[in-house]
Image: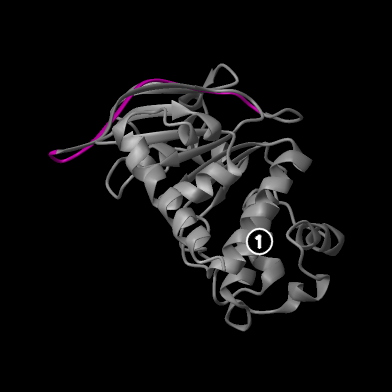
Amino acid sequence: MAGTAPRISLEHLGKRFGNTLAVDDVSLEIAGGSFLALVGASGSGKSTLLKTINRLVEPDNGSILIDGTDICRALPHELRRRIGYVFQGIGLFPHMDVKENIGIGPRLSGQRLPAARIAELLELVELDATFAARMPHELSGGQRQRIGVARALAGDPHLLLMDEPFGALDPVTRAALGKRVQDLHRQLGLTTVMVTHDMAEALLLADRVLVMDAGRIVADCTPGELLAGEGGDVAQNLVAVPREQAKALAGLTP
């Protein structure tokens, strides 16, 4: 993966939890350098699909290839060291300070990040180097999530996976951090896959939006195509929410 944004291929992927078919025969090509958003209602399978890419969830059938190599050929912990992952619940260790939280991934592989690298990662997420010595309880929600993004980037990955990364943040912080992640995607040359239930967020950040329903991909469009009415009923029901909000706000203008 080193040096270039990887391409991802999912081939006939399936995953069942008991009687629930979470991912239903999904085949998908993600070009290197894409910013892809997975959108859908709760239970549509989007988070499960994301987690199969770094083997937090093992599919029952099908295969996943990164740059043509089946990910099952690597041990899960080795694979995850090459993939940045931003958790839905941030997941900072409360007993570790910021520098320890950021450096936990490299540390598990026998590397200790120098202070200069910690400062560089903090700068990437627009935090001052003095944050390195702070504890998680001393940070705001937005600051904690920025640390989560810095931690995901600590191993110099070229693939970034994000599972509802901004869901718990206030709207202003959410918008600012989303824009920063979009900038980092371009600046660092990443392939980024983000799960979100917020269609407006997907339209604003991603260059390709997949809509999931009952474990299947029911729409695969650019933001412009979705706004033009393409993608089918499920997709357009999701687009209708920000569209109606925008109309309502326009109506408030004096």
Is residue 232 shown left or right of residue 120?
left
Residue at 33% across / 31% down in the picture? 59
Residue 213 location, x and y as percent?
A: 28, 36
In the displayed structure, would residue 121 be above or below residue 158? below
Question: Is residue 78 visible in this depiction of the protein?
Answer: yes
Residue 151 location, x and y as percent?
A: 65, 57
Question: Is residue 198 visible in this depiction of the protein?
Answer: no
Seen from the viewer's position, the closer of residues 231 and 56 is 231
Q: Three-letter amino acid code at disc 1?
A: Ala
Residue 108 location, x and y as percent?
A: 62, 53
Is residue 36 shown left or right of residue 188?
left
In the displayed structure, would residue 205 be above or below residue 124? above
Circle 1 SS class: helix
Seen from the viewer's position, the closer of residues 175 and 215 is 175
Name of the residue lying farthest toward the bottom: 138
Residue at 41% across / 52% down in the picture? 244
Residue under pointer 1: 176
Residue at 44% across / 60% down in the picture? 248
* Boundaries of the magenta span: 6-19
Verify whether residue 12 appears in magenta.
yes
Quadrant of the rendering where the C terminus is positioned:
bottom right
